[in-house]
Amino acid sequence: MSSVSAVNSLLSSTATTTPAISISSILAATAGTSTPGIDVTSAVAAAIYADRAPERAWQADQTTLSSQTTALTSIQTATEALATDMQNLNSLTGPLAARTVTSSDSNDLAATAATGTVSGTHTVVVNSVATTASWYSDLESSPTATLPTSSLTLTTTAGPSATFATGTGTSGDTLNDLATAINGSNLGVRATVVSDATGSRLAIIADTSGTAAGFSITSANYTGTSWTSPDMPTGSTLGANSVTLTIGGTPTTITTTAGETYAQLATAINGLGLGVNATAGSDANGTNLTIASNDGLTPFTINEPAFGFTQSATGADASLTVDGVPIDSATNTVTGAINGVTLNLLGAAPGSPISLTVASDASQVSTAINQFVTDYNTAIGLVNTQFNVDSTTNSQGVLGTDSTVVSLQSALEQAFNYVYTPATGTTSVSTIGDLGITMANDGTLSVDSATLNSALTNNATDVQNFFEGTALNGFANSVYNTLNNYTSPANGAFKVDLNSMAATNTDLTSQINDYETGYIASQQTVLTADFSQAEVALQQLPQQMAQLNALLGLTPTGNSNG
């Protein structure tokens, strides 16, 4: 085949698939009026671009599907939030069941109520609060000072007891050691060392309050002819206590008052003429008291050992009446006196009635109602956007014709036309309008706070009945059932619609892939070969034209010497 014939053949075979190729440019090149040659890469690309026109249409469909999926997913999320709000308002443990308790004397009595507690008013009289038993030891110079030799027995009201030795080189060498030993005894008490500017004491407190958690401390009596008390830091004084001396079988009790010194106690003992001599002394660790028989032979017994304790509080139960019923409680947290209510006794006001009012928690209910209004407006706003016409493109949103969105818009607006009618009696709340909620022309809702708060304050039961009905079948349930037709994860309209979009997108991807592998790949190979052949033919044309002119005796234009 000649070069000219080859070009003609190529032009004939590609004319319908390569509209971007300039045939006039190729012919001009054959006549020598321009540089001959074809850009094979560009020519093939132009032809393939034309062949991919169906792909571009399918890809445009995929872009639309992506936009539709994104928009529908947003609407689905907003609708699910609204459905959750409805479930929250249709629950026996939700905000409508929340309760608050108001006390007429919050300094002496506070209370909380469990969800669903029956509303009402109760009268409480607190006669006394529960107290916790506690004792404290004699003063020592420091937590680590060695204690004198003695022993003490701690006995609980419930019965268990334990004896602890002091100053024996075992568990009670110091206050710190004694505290550790007591805490390890599992007697229901806790011991701590309390220190201040005057020295250190061991404080022992029952783990719980009440009479049953009380305990006592007794110490071993001393019997002999000479006894010395533990040292008391210099400048410190005695607390309120008593000392019993028994001589010849006759006990004599000497009472001390807070602020007395060992010297004053010695004077008091010596003034009784008991046959003993009391002397106040001092050493490097502080002051002390020594008692000795006058004759050095007659023994005496003293119930105040080398290390003693003073009771600071007794364990006692709380005493109160609730709606006239007497109640005793080991703690100041009282449950069971009023069903669902926990009383917290803060102080005693004997004979003074305190009023407790259990009521619906208006704050929680208001928050829940405003939340559903907000979520509803979000959902209906996203839906309405799909039907707004763009003035520039004169078109609706990507879901303007989607059947799911079209039906949802109508369903949302109709769901809020619900009217509640009680089975018996009347109600002050039969529509959302009675709660101060109104619907605008675009379907959005607004709340009049004053009207809503009035309904929650004055007609809380009617509000709850409106949302919950007689058996969780009121407004909230009605709206939820409507929304569930769309949000159900099993076969809701959103799931069906989104699955359909996903399937269509998958089909389009398969079409594009099949078209690329089944047609474009082979077409690219054929076109590359054809255009390469044409390029070779065009490169040969100038030489063949010169040969033809020579055979015909023709002189090329522009080469004459004439």
Image (spheres, rainbow, N blue to C red):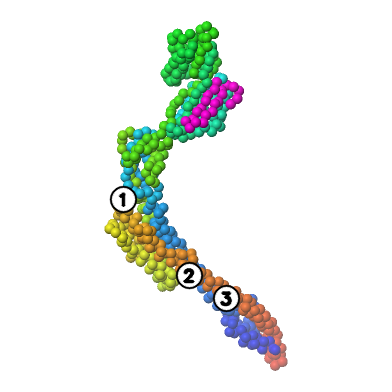
Q: Earlier in the sequence, mark 2 or mark 1?
A: 1
169 inside magenta stretch: yes
Q: Work out whether residue 373 or residue 431 is closer to the camera in this orientation and state it.
A: 431
Q: Work out whether residue 221 or residue 229 is closer to the camera in this orientation and state it.
A: 221
Cβ–Cβ below 8 Å for labels 2 and 3? no
CA distance separating discs 2 and 3 = 21 Å
Secondary structure under badge 3? helix
Q: Is residue 418 left or right of residue 257?
A: left
Cβ–Cβ below 8 Å for labels 3 and 1? no
Label 3 amino acid? Gln
CA distance separating discs 2 and 1 = 44 Å
Q: Which image quarter is the C terminus in?
A: bottom right
Q: Is residue 215 visible?
A: yes
| Residue underneath mark 3 | 511
Q: Is residue 475 left or right of residue 157?
A: left
Q: Is residue 208 left or right of residue 419?
A: right
